[in-house]
Amino acid sequence: MLSSRTLKFGQSLRLGVAADGLALLRVSGWPRAGVEVLAERAVEAGAPDALANGLRALMTEVAPRGWPVSVVLADELVRLWQVPPPQGATRLADLQAAAALRYQALFGAMPQEWRISADWDTAHPFLAAAAPQGLLALLETLAREGRFHLVEVSPQFVAAMNAWRRARRPGAWFGLVHANVLSLAAYEGRALAAVRTAVIPPGADRDWLEAHVAREALRVGVGRPERLQLCGAAPAGWASSSGRLKFACTLLEDDSADWPLHVRLARTGMDT
């Protein structure tokens, strides 16, 4: 059990939340970076109240009173989409309305049970994310009851993009590989053009990657990238090698550590 007495300078907790499991980590950034797995818990995906019961049980087990906690939500729990700002938009309310209308067009209903956040921008297309109101309310309730500090709640892809934002090179697309899913942020120049996800087939090699990126560029209506920068558990064979001329591919992370899946989720967005 943790207590405020065990909290040291530079330490925090990271909670990974997926439909089928949870992981809670203690992260120390000073004087030496390190990660300690405090708890993992399997969840029966799709079962009523299973995720809520799992979160309550995990927080009761660890009791992180007084600790700052950052939460990373698996992308299957959230919805991500790109929003072009309406012409002449000057107010946040204009952007919020545009995001809600775009959500309705993509997902077939207004986001009444979802909470939308975004990198609001009146001049350029921006990324919006929606998380279930019930899940966010549960996390807030657990923070009040357990007296810990809920610092932020981020979708995994957003956490990864923010962590590697400064590393993105001109002309590059950004991608995340997690749980056999490839998520791509396609750019046109500096502007975000779309976010696309696809299941990675077994044995997918560099040829598959090149064909997939070419198809996505056509679907989005932008040119093929000069470079693809990937984080997460990307196959080593996807990295650039001699003779590969279609685009370069950089793996941003050393994937040698054998982290369990939900621990990987919780680690997403840690200082790079």
Image: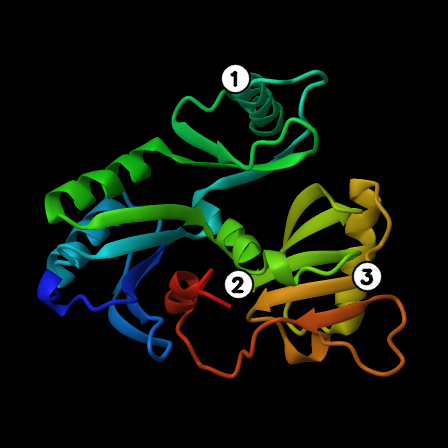
> In the image, which is nearer the foreground, mark 1 or mark 3?
1
**Up-down relation of residue 7 to residue 67 (above or below):** below
- Residue 139 in picture, x, y percent from top left: 25, 43
**Few, some or many residues within 10 Å of mark 2 (<14, 14–19, 20+):** many
Q: Is residue 176 left or right of residue 7?
A: right
Q: Amino acid at mark 3?
A: Ala
- Residue 130 in picture, x, y percent from top left: 47, 35
Q: Are marks 1 and 3 in contact (CB under 8 Å)?
A: no
Label whose residue precedes the other's in the sequence (2 or 1): 1
Q: Quadrant of the N terminus?
A: bottom left
Q: Regarding mark 2 in the picture, which secondary structure is present there? A: strand
Residue beneath disc 1:
93
Label whose residue precedes the other's in the sequence (1 or 3): 1
Q: Amino acid at mark 2?
A: His
Q: From this viewpoint, is residue 66 visible? A: yes
**Up-down relation of residue 136 to residue 244 (above or below):** above
Colouring scheme, one of rainbow, by chain, secondary structure, one colour: rainbow
Q: Regarding mark 3 in the picture, which secondary structure is present there? A: helix
Residue drawn at point x = 67 percent, y = 57 percent: 174
**Few, some or many residues within 10 Å of mark 1 (<14, 14–19, 20+):** few
User: Which quadrant of the structure image shows residue 17?
Assistant: bottom left
Q: Nearer the viewer, residue 142 or 90?
A: 90
User: Which quadrant of the structure image shows residue 222?
Assistant: top right
Residue beneath disc 2:
178
Q: How far is disc 3 from disc 2 in space, using C-alphas?
A: 20 Å
Q: Regarding mark 1 in the picture, which secondary structure is present there? A: helix
Q: How far is disc 2 from disc 1 in space, using C-alphas?
A: 34 Å
**Few, some or many residues within 10 Å of mark 3 (<14, 14–19, 20+):** few
Q: Which mark is residue 211?
A: 3
Q: Nearer the viewer, residue 29 or 210?
A: 29
Q: Is residue 219 left or right of residue 141?
A: right
